[in-house]
Amino acid sequence: DVKVTQSSRYLVKRTGEKVFLECVQDMDHENMFWYRQDPGLGLRLIYFSYDVKMKEKGDIPEGYSVSREKKERFSLILESASTNQTSMYLCASSEPGQGFTNYGYTFGSGTRLTVV
Amino acid sequence: DAKTTQPPSMDCAEGRAANLPCNHSTISGNEYVYWYRQIHSQGPQYIIHGLKNNETNEMASLIITEDRKSSTLILPHATLRDTAVYYCLYLSGYSTLTFGKGTMLLVSP
């Protein structure tokens, strides 16, 4: 069964801490994505990557950075966590040429981050 | 911003067909319509996608109008486990999906 695995299901961090959210996929997908999901706002794209060491800003990149040193791993970094970054974070992966594949994006189960 | 319009919520009786509508009037000719769903506290799950023709798989059917400005997802025999938020979306640009607020489908006994 193909999978996108997020390292933590729940995480509590203090304001100002540096936070790493890890995501690993076992499908050899080239594309990986980080979304956050908040009540009333839906899913919003933070960053994405089309290849190793490549990254592109999504709709809400402020306060975040990413790292993709290996094809299977895509990390989201909160340089200095703030309370407004309390959210559900979802990682996804897909094959290139997304519109011509059969299964779209595969999402992880999410990490619920609370910043106190 | 999401470019699709869906009703915020719908109800369906268990065992009946659930028909979820979506308007996507700005879709262009080579963009696929995708449907996902999200069960509480889980990541979104792919359901089905299509371009022009109607599609069916083990989960659902997708009916796309001839002008491609709208589509309907059909769950033929809804179960309680189909209670979820259903998202209709299409690819705009290169490989990034934009999610709207979706439709909360509540399946009742």
Image (cartoon, coloured by chain):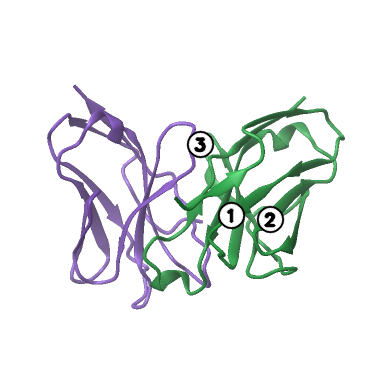
Chain colours: A green, B purple
Q: Which residue is mark 2?
A: A74
Q: Are marks 2 and 1 in contact (CB under 8 Å)?
A: yes
Amino acid on which disc 1 is placed: Gln
Q: Residue at x 68, y 55 (%)?
A: A74
A112 relative to B10 in the view: left or right: right
Nearer the camera: disc 3 or disc 1: 1
Badge 3: chain ID: A
The picture quadrant where one finds residue B18 is: top left
Label drawn at residue A25: 1
Query: Mark 3 highlights which residue?
Result: A40
Residue at 25% over, 48% down: B59
Query: Answer yes or no: do the residues labelled 3 and 2 have beta carbons within 8 Å?
Result: no
* Labels 2, 1: front one: 1
The secondary element bearing badge 3 is classed as loop
Q: Quarter of the image containing the C terminus of chain A?
A: top right
Q: Are marks 3 and 2 on the same chain?
A: yes
Give, as a three-letter code, the residue at label 3.
Gly
Q: Are marks 2 and 1 on the same chain?
A: yes
Position in image of residue B31 (x %, y %)? 38, 72
Q: Chain of mark 2?
A: A
Furthest-bottom residue in view?
B29
Q: CA distance from mark 2 to mark 1?
A: 9 Å
